[in-house]
Amino acid sequence: MISANAGLAAAAALACLIGTGCGNKLPEIAALEWRLETRPALGAGGGTDYESLSVFASLKDEDGLDNISEIWVVNDDSALAWKLTDADWIKAIEGADTWIGASALASPELAGLARGSYRMIAIDAAGQRTEKEFRISGSFPGNKAPTLSFSGGRLAISSSWPETLALAFDGAGALIGSPAAPGSPSPLSAVFGQEISLRTAELGAYGYDPALRMGAFSKRVKAK
């Protein structure tokens, strides 16, 4: 995370200098989705849950999406920005739409994220840019993060959120499954399917309120 204005201006200027061979069609942010979330404190010593931001854009570019070189998420009031490139952004394809963005964006101090206006900015290789604004407001509801237990080969999840997902992670920590949470203690094969259950190393849960665009992650537990 770096200063919003200085880093963004320098990156755009450099791209303009080296991008003369690229097309001249502006990229487009066709749609944008975001969520504000709480996550368990990092490290084994415990601590306070911290806030993070997940934001994804459905991007269009007549010169091809490979022409997108950088994405920035910026909050001007707090002078903070997150820079994303193809080395660290997440890309997902849903039908004809390609979504690019990131999850777990947090402040360096893992403090609460500023409320107010944010901008998502897409820059192509020629330095041309487009942006879309979104606004974060309000406090987290009183719902606690979901809790889960895994005993006797059965997963049980307790949650007061309107929507709750069961999460499966492989040995490298990658998310490999996220179905709806079971209503009663269930074997992993019934929750995730046989193939994913055999690869699952850790389990978690995620509660979400779509009306608020807010959610909470549980602590993870070992599946093996």
Image (tube, grey):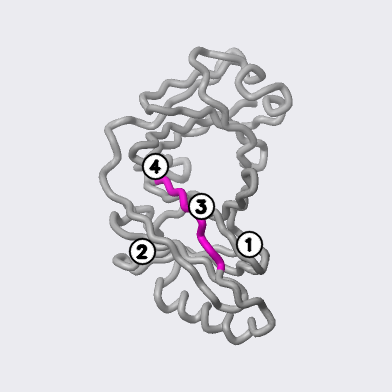
Q: Is residue 32 magenta?
A: yes
- Local packing at callout 3 (Cα closer than 10 Å; few below 14, some 14-19, many 20+) is many
Q: CA distance from mark 1 to mark 3?
A: 14 Å
What residue type is disc 1 on? Asp
- Residue that badge 3 annotates: 56
Q: Which residues are magenta?
A: 27-35
What residue type is disc 2 on? Asn
Mark 2 residue element: strand
Quadrant location, the C terminus = top right
Of badges 4 and 3, nearer the viewer stands: 3
Q: Is residue 148 magenta?
A: no
Quadrant location, the N terminus = bottom left
- Kindly indicate whether the residue at mark 3 contacts the one at mark 4 (C-beta within 8 angstroms): no
- Local packing at callout 1 (Cα closer than 10 Å; few below 14, some 14-19, many 20+) is some
- Local packing at callout 4 (Cα closer than 10 Å; few below 14, some 14-19, many 20+) is many
Mark 3 residue element: strand
- Residue that badge 1 annotates: 86
Q: Is residue 176 above or below residue 5?
A: above
What residue type is disc 4 on? Thr
Of badges 2 and 4, nearer the viewer stands: 2
| N-term-proximal mark, 1 vs 2 | 2
- Residue that badge 4 annotates: 38
- Residue that badge 2 annotates: 75
Left or right of 156: which side holds 19?
right
- Kindly indicate whether the residue at mark 1 contacts the one at mark 4 (C-beta within 8 angstroms): no
Name the residue: 49% across, 68% down: 130
